[in-house]
Amino acid sequence: MGPLYLKYDRYIECRLCPHRCKIPEGKTGICGVRKNTGNKVELITYGVISGHAIDPVEKKPLYHFFPGYNILSIGSYGCNMRCDFCQNWQISQNHQPELRVNTTIERLLNEARQVEKNIGIAFTYNEPVIWFEFMRDTALKFKENGFFTAMVSNGYVSREPLNEITEFIDAFNIDLKAFNDSFYKKLTGADLDSVKESLRVIAEKGKHLEITTLIIPGKNDSVDEMENQAKWIAGELGEDIPLHISRYFPMYRRQDPVTPQATLDTLLEAASAHLTNVYLGNTGTSSGQDTYCRKCGITVTKRHGYSTRLLNLDTEGNCIKCGSRIYRHFTFQVSNR
């Protein structure tokens, strides 16, 4: 991988994401956590966490990556997007928290070892891309100890850093915020093409990939847009890529009404015409959460909230009725760590 920054006379250019921030000495880029300290761009939140928890892997959401297991989830502060509808704005738009809580990789590893049915660690809550150095060092150590790694991200990252990220992250959930560039430019400060390119790279590398789209009434809720998105995912990434269509709630600077259930149901139907595994999220019900065998139609997983019940599956994650592969990542063997 090339350098994450280039030094010029009056500034340093950060090359981690497509913003290519030109950062004067003593200042940070858009993300608020990568600072020009004179000779380099330094991550000022290395080891700083905004929160951590033991979550069901379904909460990320990752429905097709070791369903029914847990994962240690951690996050920090800052983001390289400026979404006015951010559901985690208290940490993503907060770059200098009053209370800084630090952790170490060894402490996280020790905690992960003590959790029952824990498959590893997930970098989530805020944007993990901007936490690159700490995420890399932590993920590599976890993988050395037999764990898996996951990342929940907006996908706004440059190609070379992403290539390296795919070497130490096993599973991705990418937030595809809309399928029109106007939405991205006006509401996030980013661009759609860069995120699409990240999705292609992750799929080409053979990493586990799931996608989430938060549906905001009047902004990205048209059937045509969802059909275009689903067709693109099926054609460019694969029709088996799980898509999570998530309900929006008024948050941060946007006060649009909550996404109607009828809208979510309509978009679920539209996306399901092109994709095998489409789910509804953030609804408070079990509607649109179950997994079915794409070949014979039998129910193989029932979900309610983050509770998961596996049905009609063999020990390898295949349908017991027709033998079709449902889950590539199904049984996690706990080794002597």
Image: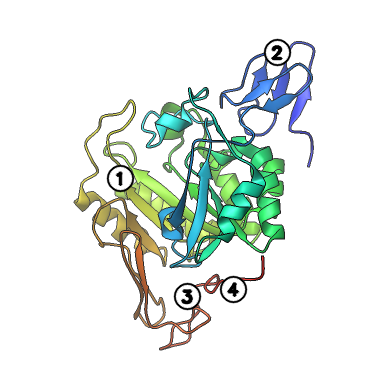
Q: Quadrant of residue 217?
A: top left
Location of the N terminus by quadrant is top right
Location of the C terminus by quadrant is bottom right
Vertical relation: 170 (above or below) 194: below
Q: Secondary structure at mark 3?
A: loop
Say whether marks 1 and 3 touch (CB < 8 Å). Answer: no
Tell which of 45 and 320 is nearer to you.
45
Image coords of residue 149 (percent x, y): 60, 56
Q: Earlier in the sequence, mark 4 or mark 1?
A: 1
Q: How much space separates mark 2 and mark 3, taking CA atoms?
A: 52 Å
> What residue do we see at 47% from left, 41% from top?
125
- Label 2: which residue? 25
Vertical relation: 160 (above or below) 254: below
Indicate the amino acid at tag 1.
Answer: Ser
Vertical relation: 223 (above or below) 189: below
- Label 1: which residue? 222
- Label 3: which residue? 326
Q: Earlier in the sequence, mark 4 or mark 3?
A: 3
Say whether marks 2 and 3 touch (CB < 8 Å). Answer: no
> What residue do we see at 41% from left, 54% from top?
59
> What residue do we see at 46% from left, 45% from top?
176
Q: Is residue 228 left or right of residue 146?
A: left
